[in-house]
Amino acid sequence: MAKGVPWLQLGNSDSPPRGSGSGHWVWPIFRGQGRPNCFGPLQRHLVETRHRPRRYPQPPRRKITFAELADAALEYAKANKLSYDDDVIRMKPMREAFGNRTAESITSQDIERWLLSHETWKPATANRYTALFSLVYGLGIDNNKVSTNPVKQVRKRRENNGRERYLTGSEEQTLREQISNRCPQHLPEFEIALHTGMRRGEQFGCEWTWVNLERRVLTIPRSKHGEKRRVYLNDIAVAAFRVLWRFSKGSGRVFGHLYQSD
């Protein structure tokens, strides 16, 4: 028996305890048909040993490549993100640079150097790639494929891409004339973009179920920020939607069946 573990010598109820200093405890307490009721320190030792969880050696984790994490991230983005198409485009250069490497071999310094190598990128563009890297590793941690996220140490760029730009009357007239002469089937797109202010993704993802011409309102069920948004239509926007309606199938995307001008 291991050193320091007390032992028990059963006897009758008159058996005295062994002398102090022996290092062993014998204190039988009987109940009923000679069955011991408690063993003092020995009982505690047996209970602790019985309920102690066994530790088994963990099998070595298979090395996951960045490409595998990227595929899982795109699968998630397809089901949950409005920017899935943009993520597909951004993921391509990321896979070219890191796809064959094991995910846990990529450091924050590697990602930072890769971002800096694209000198023409604006801060907002670099931040979008950083966010996609973070999604890749965040999902990998959630799925127990990797244990660390190197993107946490990658600094975010300070964005200052804001700008205000308004068409002048002459510019608007020139654009309308050029579209009418070169591709008149796209003129309703121009009018709707000009008079609704919708984002590009919102406009070309617009479906007929969103449009209510009687109430002159277009309801975007999920905007960029994840909330419902309403766009009110003026006379020019309503007229453009009516032209598109005449050449549509009455369902699906508004700009899926562009009309052909005579």
Image (cartoon, grey):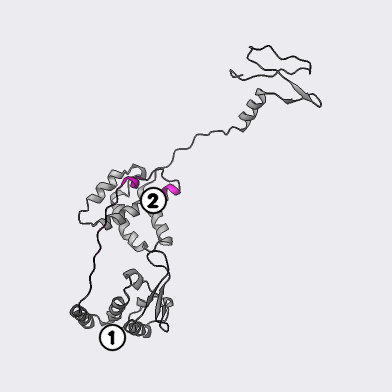
Describe residue 236's horizontal placement relative to residue 250 as left or right.
left
Mark 2: few/some/many CA within 10 Å (<14, 14-19, 20+): many
Figure quadrant of the N terminus = top right
Q: Main secondary structure of the magenta part?
A: loop
Describe residue 16's horizontal placement relative to residue 66 as left or right.
right
How many angstroms separate mark 1 from mark 2 (CA)?
47 Å
Q: Position of residue 27 (x, y in %)?
A: 71, 19
Residue holding disc 2: 69
Res 191 quadrant in image: bottom left
Secondary element type, mark 2: helix
Q: Nearer the viewer, residue 178 or 104?
A: 178
Chain part drawn in magenta? 140-166
Where 56 sits versus 184, above or below? above
- Residue at point 28%, 44% (across, down): 109
Q: Amino acid at mark 2?
A: Leu
Q: Is residue 68 in sight in this rendering?
A: no
Secondary element type, mark 1: loop
Q: Amino acid at mark 1?
A: Ser
Q: Confirm whether the magenta stretch covers residue 14.
A: no
Res 251 quadrant in image: bottom left
Residue holding disc 1: 261
